[in-house]
Image: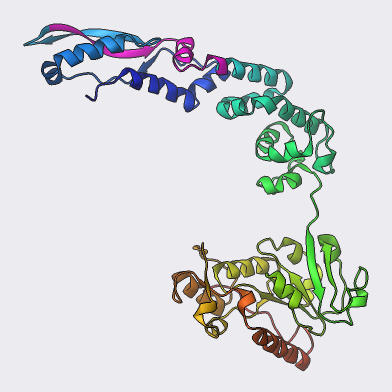
Amino acid sequence: MSWTSPDDLNAQIAQLWERGTIPSAVVTGEVLFPKRLRLKVPSSAELAANFAAARAWASALTSVPHVRIERRTLQHRVLGANELPSEAWIDTLDEALAACRRATDAEQLRRLRDETAARLPALVSWIARYPLRALDLENDWSRLLSVCEWMLANPRPGIYLRQVDVPGVHSKFIQAHRGTLAALLDLVLAPAAIDASATGVSNFERRYGFRSKPAFVRVRVLDPAVTPLLPTSPPLAGGAADLTLDADTFAALDLPVTHVFVTENETNFLSFPSVPGSLVVFGAGYGMEAIGAAPWLARVVVHYWGDIDTHGFAILAQLRAHLPHARSMLMDEATLLAHPRDVWSIEATPVTHLITGLTADEHAFFRRLQRGDYGAGARLEQERVGFERVERALRSIHALSCTARAGTEWGRPDHSSP
């Protein structure tokens, strides 16, 4: 039968807790009860066809603890007058908490609310909105409040998270709770203490005025004549200098180079051939801010060499957001088709959205890759490009650079997608 069972009634009460309706009322004192529950009862035809079952159903429903059942008399032409359940009610908050066995949780919520109201009243609204999340954080809540209090006393502190001096709180605690802390700090801090342009957990430090771990850029100088000008110790014997610089040092470089190559594969980075007046940067995927923020890169020719796949072109577009004049290298249909299919691989999760910042030829090739014109997910990883082809491309670049003044013969290509 589809009549409402005792389990159905209890499930409705449990849902009021699980959806946060009852927990929020516990925090705010909102009056929710008496509350009528959904009740499906036998029809007249069902009563006649299943009279014994209907009587058992009525008896079971009446015995559900903490639920008040109202009854009405049903006149039936064959069965006569019979009293059957017609409505089900939860009359009080305490009855609801007892029915879903959440009285202890409700007391914990009240303690969290009272502590918060005494220390940081502005955060009571957060508990009311996310009461179940607050319960999950019960063991950490006092420390979260302590961090918020410290931030109120020290807005935009300009130190590393490791230096926050709050009893019982360490940097890993703050790191682990950045999402929750961001929501809480937005409620208690003055707007002037928040950098609204810094969003997301990864920008927590910048949003609230902490010092961030410095970004680093790994470079190799491809011209021995430039190596002695580097702000570091002499290169390793037998090879060009391979060094890692913090982003500020990289941005401040003033080297006599005309070409910078950005590559995504470490093996290619390490084996990149010598090129006069050049260096190579290990791009390491998405996240081009540290590279693109270097102002001196605006005056040199920048070449990006990534995988021939949809993500390779997406990273190229990201680099061009910082360096619009960046050119792609060995990322074209001719390079793909010059290699046998048995060295191709499959891109597991291709980029499905359209991207901007590509030349017309690059965009057309990107769309063919997206559509699967060369096979679903076809890709050629850059480390599989034949080394002789790499050397030939670099010779061509060097020859062109020798025919005119560096930086002017390349022009500024149109990177607007069709």
Q: Residue furthest left?
A: 78
Left/right placement of residue 124 relative to residue 54 reads: right
Q: Is residue 375 visible?
A: yes
- The picture quadrant where one finds residue 107 is top right
Left/right placement of residue 40 relative to residue 342 reads: left
168 or 155, nearer to the observer: 168
Q: Which residues are magenta?
A: 81-105
Image: 234 above or below 200? below
Residue 372 image point, x, y percent: 44, 72
327 or 393, nearer to the observer: 393
Q: Which residue is painted at 87% across and 75% down in the image? A: 255
Image: 231 above or below 175? below
Residue 279 image point, x, y percent: 79, 76
Q: Residue furthest bottom?
A: 403
Q: Is residue 262 visible?
A: no
Residue 318 image point, x, y percent: 64, 65
Q: How many marks?
A: 0
Left/right placement of residue 310 relative to residue 306 reads: left
- The picture quadrant where one finds residue 280 is bottom right
196 or 185, nearer to the observer: 185
Residue 37 image point, x, y percent: 35, 18
Left/right placement of residue 132 relative to residue 210 reads: left
Placement of the N terminus among the 4 image quadrants: top left
Q: Which residue is painted at 70% across and 84% down in the image? A: 410
Q: Which residue is painted at 68% across and 60% down in the image? A: 287
- How was the colour assigned to the protein in this rendering? rainbow
Does residue 101 show up magenta in the picture? yes
Does residue 38 show up magenta in the picture? no
Q: Which residue is painted at 57% across and 80% down in the image? A: 332
Image: 196 above or below 97? below
